[in-house]
Amino acid sequence: MVELKTDTSIEAMYKAGQVVGQALTAVRKAADVGVSLLELDEVAREVLRVAGATSPFLGYRPSFAPVPFPAVICTSVNDAIVHGIPTGYRLRDGDLVSVDCGAELGGWAGDSAISFTVGTPRPADVRLIETAERALAAGIEAAVVGNRLGDIAHAIGSVCRAAGYGVPDGFGGHGIGRKMHEDPSVPNEGRPGRGMPLRHGLVLAIEPMLVASGRDDYHAAPDGWTLRTNDGSRAAHTEHTVAITEAGPRILTAR
């Protein structure tokens, strides 16, 4: 069931979204050569603690997962697309890192993700990340009253495909509100003018995922969580929580 949020609820979600933005900013600042993924998770935990927020990631266990998720951020490095579990792995020069973070505050959730490079960036990684950000911006631009879900999906997919990148099958964004994952699903490819009409009060987590090789296939790592590209090529992931309003799309997780 799709729930439309009131303006008051959107304001409350904005507060949760700002905590997410603060956590991602702190993690990005802390990420450097030699820093472990577990240390980045601790950085995010501290931001949530200070804000009085909790994590919708920690302990989350969907039907596919062999164990509950053990961290407050997902850290996906190089060929990992999404859902990477923070480990003792220490970042190396040239790594491409995607970090996904959520927060719950006052009964409402926020969800956002960023991709960045550590140390000396590879030009190909810079292009991949820039395209992911452009795809996210295109999806947000299409998130207006009167459009449909397919318009968001088409906007994202068009940017990704035009640049020659893959779009992982079956993954995309989602509704968000009292829970991190709510209806509707938001595909990263689709036909314009199709799907549910966008109305004031609909809040979506819009999240492009791009594969550098142009392939769409992937597999789950032995941990049961991390999704990796089948050919070992690099991936990028960006995300914002966005409220659809009569005044236009409002990014609730702006950093």
Image: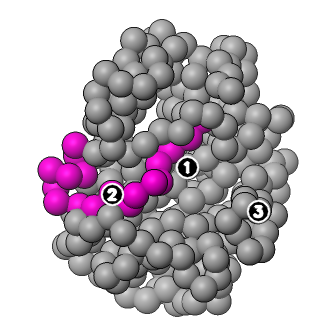
Q: Earlier in the sequence, mark 3 or mark 1?
A: 3
**Distance from the alpha carbon under mark 1 to that under mark 2:** 18 Å
* Above-or-below relation of 164 to 124: above
Q: Are marks 2 and 3 in contact (CB under 8 Å)?
A: no
The residue singled out by tag 1 in the image is: 112
Which segment did they paint magenta? 158-175
Is disc 2 placed on a helix, strand or loop? loop
Q: Is residue 199 magenta?
A: no
Q: Is residue 118 visible?
A: no
Question: Residue 173: x, y in percent?
Answer: 50, 44
**Distance from the alpha carbon under mark 2 to that under mark 3:** 24 Å
The residue singled out by tag 2 in the image is: 167
Instruction: Name which residue type carries label 2.
Output: Val
Quadrant of residue 85 within the rendered picture: bottom right
Q: Earlier in the sequence, mark 2 or mark 3?
A: 3
Closer-to-camera residue (140/253): 140
Which quarter of the rendered picture does the N terminus lie within? top right
Quadrant of residue 151 within the rendered picture: top left
User: Callout 3: 10 Å neighbours few (<14), some, many (20+)?
Assistant: some
Instruction: Name which residue type carries label 1.
Output: Ser
Closer-to-camera residue (8/208): 208
Q: Earlier in the sequence, mark 1 or mark 2?
A: 1
Q: What color scheme is it?
A: one colour
Question: Residue 127: x, y in percent?
Answer: 21, 63
Foreground tag (1 vs 2): 2
Q: Residue at x 58, y 67 (%)?
A: 83
The residue singled out by tag 3 in the image is: 61
Question: Residue 122: x, y in percent?
Answer: 24, 78
Foreground tag (3 vs 1): 3
Closer-to-camera residue (103/50): 103
